[in-house]
Amino acid sequence: MNLKSEIEYFTEMRLLDKARLLNMFLHELSQEARGTYGPTVEDVHDTAHLRFVNELTHRLTRVIEQLLAEDATRPADDVVLRMLLSPRADKVAERLVYNAYGRAINGFESYDTTVLMGG
């Protein structure tokens, strides 16, 4: 994965598409996180990576909110993508993110919508 080209691609998107892509990523990341636990509460066997996913979800849901509100104080696009896609010392966490991002970006389709419902 080429971080520079991913940043360029993300930067060219409309705000709504950025929010949609990040939302798709979070959906895929939650799928990855399912490997950290079993069917019961007592079956959490990888608490470190479950916490990693939770913390990343916390940060990105705020970014999505800021994108949708067109908040000028939101993190820059390159900061968001570097937070996600920069190499990590923890290779399991890196794999969780890369797997989720790969599925999200491959399934992403930009809608050329200019009018939203009720708009």
Image (cartoon, grey):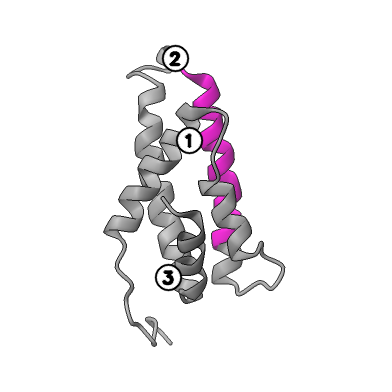
Q: Amino acid at mark 1?
A: Glu
7 vs 115, left or right, is right
Q: Is residue 71 above or below residue 81?
A: below
Reply above or below: 3 against 20. Answer: above
Would you say the residues marked 2 and 3 are in contact, meaning their CB atoms lie under 8 Å apart? Answer: no
Local secondary structure at mark 1: helix
Q: Tell me which numbered mark, 2 or 1, is placed earlier along the sequence.
A: 2
Q: Within 10 Å of the Cα at label 3, are there few (<14), some (14-19), or many (20+) other Cα atoms?
A: many
Q: Main secondary structure of the magenta part?
A: helix
Spatial CA distance of label 1 from label 3 is 24 Å
Q: Amino acid at mark 2?
A: His
Position of residue 2 measured from the top left corner of the image (x, y, whole percent): 44, 54
- Residue at 47 percent across and 64 percent down: it is 19
**Residue 97 image point, x, y percent:** 45, 41
Q: Which mark is residue 12?
A: none
Q: Dot 2 lies on which element?
A: loop
Q: Which residues are magenta?
A: 45-64
The residue to which callout 1 is attached is 94
Q: Residue at x 53, y 44 (%)?
A: 57
| Residue at mark 2 | 45
Q: In the rendering, which numbered label is found on residue 17?
A: 3
- Relative side of 26 to 113, left or right: right
